[in-house]
Image (spheres, helix red, strand yellow):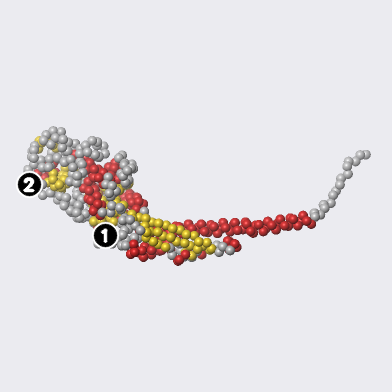
Amino acid sequence: MTFGPARTFGIPTRQPLSNRRERGGALLLFTFMTILVIIPVIGLAIDGSILFWTKAKLSSAVDAAALAAGRSINVYETQQQNSGPVAAVAQEWFAANFPAGWLGTSVVGGAPTVTIAPTSTMTQTVVVTASATVPLYFMRLLHFSSATVAASAQSSRRNINLVLVLDRSGSMGPGGSNACPTMIASAQNFVNLFTDGFDTLGLVTFSTTANTGPIDYAPTTFFKSSTPTLNSRIGQIVCTGATSTAQALHVAYESIKSTGLAGGLNVIVFFTDGQPNLIVEKSWKIKTQTDTRNNPNPPWSSTSIGASPCNSSDVLSGGFTTLLASGTAPSNTGYTGGVYSTANTAITTAPGPITSASGCAFTNNGSTYARDDVAYIQNTDAYGNVTNSGYIGQGRVGAPDTFPSGPYIRKIRDDEQLNGVMAAAFAAADYQGQLIRNDTTYNTIIYTIGLDGAPDMGIDQVFLQRLANDPSSPIYDSTRPAGYYAYAADPSALSQAFHEIASQVLRLSK
């Protein structure tokens, strides 16, 4: 019998005492390293997070304080006079955003430091700095009980010199879209977004005419605290009459220049619900010869019309316009009317009366006969705006229609609504817009708001884009200040449109 190799059942031997001591030493060393390295790293992460959080909140607080302080500056006071009130505003906003004792912190010096830096003619600069002592928790084990974080913010703001130009023509009234009350409320909310004592605001309204002097509300820095306030004047607006766009833009531009804030943020905000349909002349050419033109009343047939019965001493000065029955659209025939006085009228009343001119056809037979007294539309209006070239309205190209024959051949027709009077009115308004945009002294930015839905002559969006030098404009000029066109599809969208424009202006003023 054969047996395999015998198995040996060994008994574990005891490790030497020296090995056990080595293992214990390693465990002790690991524990020591954990306390010395890992715990401080964790503590540093926690305390560092608290420091980072405090720094972020401190930065947010000084940012808010600087912006609020900048908007509180009174431009009619010296830096020394402003320093106290401005610092108070800054500290109030800082305290609201960084409460005392927040997370156990304390503000060094008890409050931020506020300084009004040296300013240029039209720019005010406020600097707010603050430091906070932050208690540490875990890092105290390493004898670091606190740390200090600091933040600084600067607010620089150009003074705003803004003229609000509001269309109060008849299409805004009860016979049209009845958007007048909504426009008034939206414009008042717009005004409330600007700062009394800092910004300068004025008002120009227009219908058949625009008040040239004094304007509806002369630009003032105290538009909320003066008597009357700007908003109370806006609240008086009554919507009636035609649309004297070129004249309104001219009056607004002259107001910008008269304020003299060449280094400020000069802005015209132009609102309309329709199209230009009126031209102003200081002296219309009286029709002294027989020619062929459309009759001033239905059936509009073209016929030979003799010389005007106006007296030789008469000077026809005022606005020549189209006259539309409610809900109708302009045409190459139809009513034209004038000559309307450009004398100032209250914004609570209808536009000025027909110009007084003894013997004239329109004086004896009504305003529609003005085309029997006025020979033609001149190539420039009362303000030097070109009427025979430029943009003449969407869908029309070239130049306004002219008389094809007779003594006034090649002169702009005043017996046509669409391609005569309105085309010339468009050209004049477009030219005025170019003059404003090209003035490199005042660098005025034009913002436009168009309300759609007028029952007769709805807005021309291309014209409003051109006027604003909106980047969507077909003639956008990147070398000139870019404005913005805001579209309102109906009266309910007006408030948002005005707010969009205010946001654009205030963003640039920062």
Disc 2 on helix, strand or loop?
A: loop
Confirm whether residue 499 shows in the render: no
Q: Amino acid at mark 2?
A: Ser
Mark 1, other Cα within 10 Å: few <14 / some 14–19 / many ≥20: some
Residue at position x 24%, y 36% in the image: 397
For the residues carrying marks 2 and 1, which lies nearer the camera in this image?
2
Residue at position x 50%, y 63% in the image: 133
The quarter holding residue 403 reads top left
In which quadrant is the N terminus drawn?
top right
The quarter holding residue 386 reads top left
Residue 223 vertical position relative to residue 241 in the rendered view, above or below: below
Q: Nearer the viewer, residue 158 or 316?
A: 158
Q: Position of residue 66 (x, y in %)?
A: 40, 58
Q: Please give left or right for residue 415 compared with residue 100 in the image.
A: left
Residue at position x 23%, y 53% in the image: 258
Q: Position of residue 473 (x, y in %)?
A: 31, 41
Residue matched to label 2: 313
Disc 1 on helix, strand or loop?
A: loop
Mark 2, other Cα within 10 Å: few <14 / some 14–19 / many ≥20: few
| Marks 2/1: CA–CA distance | 43 Å
Q: Amino acid at mark 1?
A: Thr
Q: Position of residue 39 (x, y in %)?
A: 61, 58
Q: Nearer the viewer, residue 46 or 419?
A: 46
**Tag count:** 2
